[in-house]
Amino acid sequence: MAHILIIEDHQDNRDVTALILTDAGHTVISAGDGFNGLHMAEYNQPDLIVMDLALPKLNGWETTRRLKANPATWHIPVIACTAHVLPDDRARALAAGCVSVIAKPFEIETLVTQIAKALAQHTRVRSVGSG
């Protein structure tokens, strides 16, 4: 399946999300803040990132903007997984470069479905771009 980076500051949320994704057949790595997430994304080149927006040190909106500005990581799809789901928050996440926004607490099916959708779209875009 896919190699997924979870950027989430709450250990319990990281653990639960990792368990769900591992159970779905993915391999998972994680970071507890935006700065570590940037480093791990560049070094590990995951297939997808699940991003909390309320992160310490560097919030998820700015972390996503930096990922999208970096030639080494711009291509990695980012899904925001956050309690910040007001219309303005969603718009900011999409403007920063997220492909979708999932509200916390989330349904397992929603997370797995959105990841599959983002991975399928990313695969289509990359194969069209490489041809």
Image: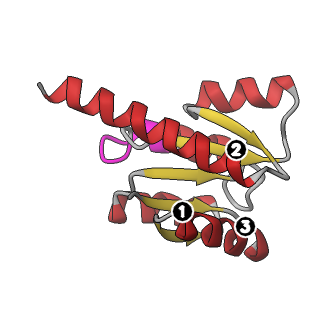
* Residue 71 painted magenta: yes
Q: Neighbour class for label 2 at 10 Å: few (<14), some, many (≥20)?
A: few
* Residue 94 painted magenta: no
Q: Neighbour class for label 1 at 10 Å: few (<14), some, many (≥20)?
A: few
Kindly report which numbered mark, 1 or 3, lies closer to the viewer in this rendering: 1
According to the picture, the residue beneath numbered tag 2 turns out to be 110
Q: Classify the position of the C terminus by image quarter.
A: top left
User: Label 1 sits on what residue type?
Assistant: Ala
According to the picture, the residue beneath numbered tag 1 turns out to be 24
In the rendering, at what x and y percent does residue 52 appear?
A: 70, 53
Q: Is residue 102 above or below residue 130?
A: below
Q: Is residue 131 above or below residue 8?
A: above
Name the residue rendered at 31%, 40% in the picture: 71
Dot 1 or dot 3: first in sequence order is 3
Q: In the figure, is residue 34 to the left or right of 68?
A: right
User: Label 3 sits on what residue type?
Assistant: Asp
Assess whether mark 1 and mark 2 are in contact (beta carbons under 8 angstroms): no
Question: Residue 122 lies in what quarter of the image?
Answer: top left
Assess whether mark 3 and mark 1 are in contact (beta carbons under 8 angstroms): no
What is the number of the mark on residue 9? 3
Q: Is residue 23 above or below residue 107?
A: below
